[in-house]
Image: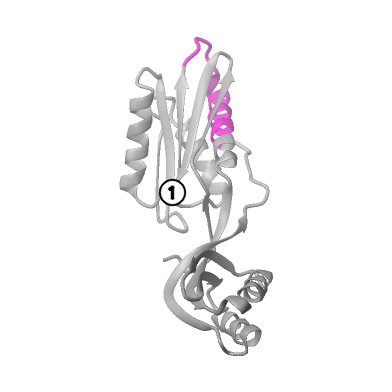
């Protein structure tokens, strides 16, 4: 598990742009391993078998622990690197972008290629909604029905996340809090229910702390 805040993508995305008759199709997604990255690339190649190029870049782990890019036959430095720079300059980890190009017959030049690949990658990353993850702790909290609404409001007002609710003899909340805020969560449970709530620690995890702000697309 990551020990500090980090950025990744929320979901898969798919966009298409046209630059001087060339079509650039960009797909972005969160990933967790090099094997997953390779599967994602292979799927795009199968989906667009007649495309001119399948350029890609991916990063896994914090501070460039693992990263890779490919120009896939485009002039060196004009394709894969601009795509990687979109992820790197915005600090986005555990993510991949594949930009598939259908050549339209008009040469773009090295600068034009870099800008086109960067523009397509940036649009795909924006569409995939970059977010900030933080280390968290997961708890299972049980309380009687008469106190459940007040406890839910208090937990959410504090900024903690209720992932799900199971309705059994008592409602049971699967709740996440930031690492280091465990005692505050337990304090709220005790105060709101006069000590009647039961909280069970389930272990470490991670959670979304919010969306990434303005992105950098200067390619």
* Residue drawn at the location 40% of the way across and 28% of the way down: 54
Q: Which residue lies furthest to the top in this view?
A: 105
Q: For mark 1, does the 10 Å Cα neighbourhood hold few (<14), some (14 to 19), or many (20 or more) residues?
A: many
Residue 112: in magenta span: yes
Q: In this view, does 157 lie above or below 91?
A: below
Magenta stretch, main secondary structure, is helix
Q: Does residue 92 appear left or right of residue 31 in this picture?
A: right
Q: Does residue 125 appear left or right of residue 73 in this picture?
A: right
The number of callouts visible is 1
Q: Can residue 78 be seen in this view?
A: no
Q: Residue 170 placed where, x, y %? A: 50, 76
Secondary structure, mark 1, is: strand
* Residue drawn at the location 58% of the way across and 15% of the way down: 20
Q: Residue 27 placed where, x, y %? A: 48, 34
In front of the other: 59 or 181: 181
* Residue drawn at the location 48% of the way across and 65% of the way down: 206
Q: In which quarter of the image is the N terminus?
A: bottom left
Residue 195: in magenta span: no
Q: Is residue 109 above or below residue 122?
A: above
Residue under label 1, please give it: 59
């Amino acid at each position: 598990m990551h020990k500090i805040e980090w950025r990744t993508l929320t979901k898969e995305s798919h966009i298409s742009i046209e630059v001087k008759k060339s079509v650039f199709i960009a797909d972005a997604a969160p990933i967790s391993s090099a094997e997953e990255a390779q599967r994602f690339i292979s799927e795009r190649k199968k989906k667009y078998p007649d495309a001119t190029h399948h350029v890609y870049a991916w990063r896994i782990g914090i501070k460039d622990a693992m990263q890779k890019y490919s120009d896939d036959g485009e002039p060196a430095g004009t394709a894969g690197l601009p795509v990687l720079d979109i992820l790197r300059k915005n600090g986005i980890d555990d993510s991949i972008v594949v930009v598939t190009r259908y050549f339209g017959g008009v040469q773009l030049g090295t600068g034009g290629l870099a800008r086109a690949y960067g523009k397509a990658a940036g649009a795909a990353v924006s569409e995939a909604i970059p977010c900030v993850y933080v280390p968290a702790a997961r708890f299972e909290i049980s309380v009687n029905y008469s106190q459940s609404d007040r406890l839910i409001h208090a937990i959410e007002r504090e900024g903690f996340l209720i992932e799900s609710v199971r309705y059994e003899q008592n409602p049971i909340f699967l709740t996440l809090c930031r690492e280091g805020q465990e005692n505050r969560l337990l304090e709220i449970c005790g105060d709101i229910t006069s000590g009647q709530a039961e909280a069970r620690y389930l272990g470490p995890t991670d959670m979304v702390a919010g969306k990434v702000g303005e992105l950098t697309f200067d390619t």
